Amino acid sequence: MNKGKIIGLIAVLVVAGAALYGADTAIPKGVQPLMVQGAFYTPSWSCIYLKGSDELKLKYKPNAWNTYSIKVTKDATTYDGTNGNFSNMNVFRIKSNTDKPSKDVVLVIDNVKIVDGKGKTVYFLDFEDGKSGDVSKTQGRPAADNGTVVEVGGKKGLMLHMKSENMYGYNGLEAQWTLPAAPDGAAGYDLNGGDWTVTYDYYISVE
């Protein structure tokens, strides 16, 4: 290979590397929140909140991909507003807390997966199509780029970029998705069997 081709190849590699690096560094930076968790809601707003990453002692490293994973059981809930009746669940939420309000938090979410007791995937989002899955904000003060699909750490994901908001006795931010229609015309899904699972990957972008 002649000198000109070598120089040209090096230039291509440098540009490609810069583009990849730029994709990661373009992600905003925030503070590290206290934890992440999952939650389910019914059409009448009864809800359960599952134990957070702190209670589960999950890997929680900033500026790296981590995984939240939990089986939906009575013992796995940190808040139960249903009086123990986990039926008619039609909305899934991802929640995070900070120690004080108005803290800027940047979470990138990927591979949201809800599996029923028979091993069937009821809901899955990987954001490879660049769409948000019709996410809606339920708590937190969103930045202009909140809810956009970004690439970080070699993966595409949905960026939740919000300032935490003091509501319901805690400083939090939340996003939610409506689940597909339940079978047999039910208002939502029955999670009482204790054998459903929730997993999602998350990247905490921190200074």
Image (cartoon, rainbow, N blue to C red):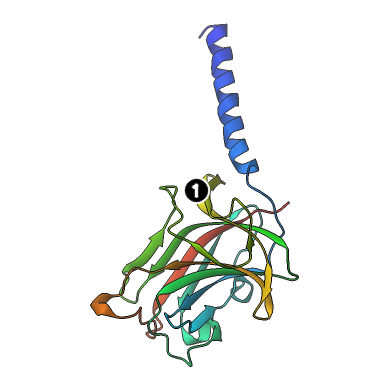
Whole-percent x and y of residue 150? 54, 47
Residue plotted at (61% across, 52% down): 144
* Residue 44 drawn at (x, y percent): 44, 83
At x 42%, y 80%, the residue is 43
Q: Position of residue 188 (x, y in %)?
A: 35, 78
Write the residue at 68% across / 69% down.
165
Q: Amino acid at mark 1?
A: Lys
44 displayed left or right of 20: left
- Residue 78 drawn at (x, y percent): 57, 83
Which quadrant would residue 178 be assigned to in this image?
A: bottom left
Residue lying furthest bottom: 83
Circle 1 is placed at which residue position? Answer: 156
Between 129 and 24, the residue placed more toward the observer is: 129
Q: Residue furthest right?
A: 100
Numbered disc total = 1
Element class at badge 1: strand
Residue at the spot 50% in from the left edge and 9% down from the top edge: 1
Image quadrant of residue 53? bottom right
Q: Residues within 10 Å of mark 1 (few under 14, many from 20)?
A: some
Which is more toward the observer, 140 or 27? 140
Above or below for 85 versus 6: below
Location of residue 24 by image quarter:
top right
Residue extending farthest to the left is: 184
Vertical relation: 108 (above or below) 176: above
Left/right of residue 170 with respect to residue 66 in the rendered view: right
- Give whichever of 123, 179 is nearer the camera: 179
Above or below 62: residue 123:
below
